[in-house]
Image (cartoon, helix red, strand yellow):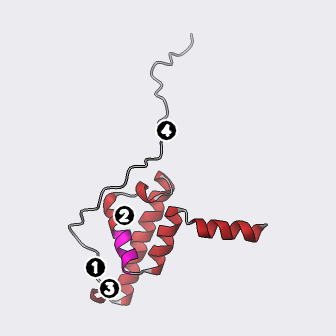
Amino acid sequence: MTPSTSNILPFPTRTPSSAPLPPVQDKHPVPAGDKLDADERANYVASIVRSTIGFAKRKGRRIGSLPPQLRGWLLGLCEQGDPTCLVVRDWLDGNPSFNSRSSQEGA
């Protein structure tokens, strides 16, 4: 007797969305740098970056794969000029300038 395949669901596929992301409504703004000491700020940035990388690995490496709240925190830190968050944002965006440099160095 062969098993029935009627209970097998097709694997969902993702199609890239070209629609712009909705603006993030942040009820709790990102803490200002002057309200945190150096260790607290480093821990705060590390928690945002750690969560961002985790979501990107699971959901796909693009800014749209992040939950709206986490995306707002990351982009808020980027606006404040945090270098770690800027690198992570560029990594999510694919940063073509980095990709072309690495391909030229490998050639």
Q: Are marks 1 and 3 in contact (CB under 8 Å)?
A: yes
* Image position of 2 (left or right of 19): right
Q: Earlier in the sequence, mark 2 or mark 3?
A: 3
Residue 78 belongs to the span the image colors magenta: yes
Image-quadrant location for residue 23: bottom left
Q: What residue type is labelled 3?
A: Gly
Label 4 Cα neighbours within 10 Å, binned few <14 / some 14-19 / many ≥20: few
Q: Which mark is residue 13?
A: 4
Q: Which residue lies furthest to the top in this view?
A: 1
- The numbered mark at residue 71 is 2
Q: Nearer the viewer, residue 85 or 93?
A: 93
In what element is the residue under mark 1? loop
Q: Mark 3 points at which residue?
A: 33
| Residue 36 position in % (x across, y down) | 30, 86
- Distance from disc 2 to disc 4, alpha carbons, whole Å, reads 23 Å
The residue lying at 35 percent from left, 55 percent from top is: 21
Residue 69 point in image, percent of width and height: 31, 62
Q: Is mark 2 on a helix, strand or loop?
A: helix
Q: Mark 1 points at which residue?
A: 31
Q: Looking at the image, tell me whether mark 1 or mark 4 is earlier in sequence order.
A: 4
Cα–Cα span, label 1 and label 2: 15 Å
- The main secondary structure of the magenta stretch is helix
Tell me, yes or no, whether the highlighted magenta stretch contains residue 10.
no
Quarter of the image with the N terminus is top right
Q: Quick one: label 3, few (<14), some, or many (20+) residues within 10 Å?
A: few
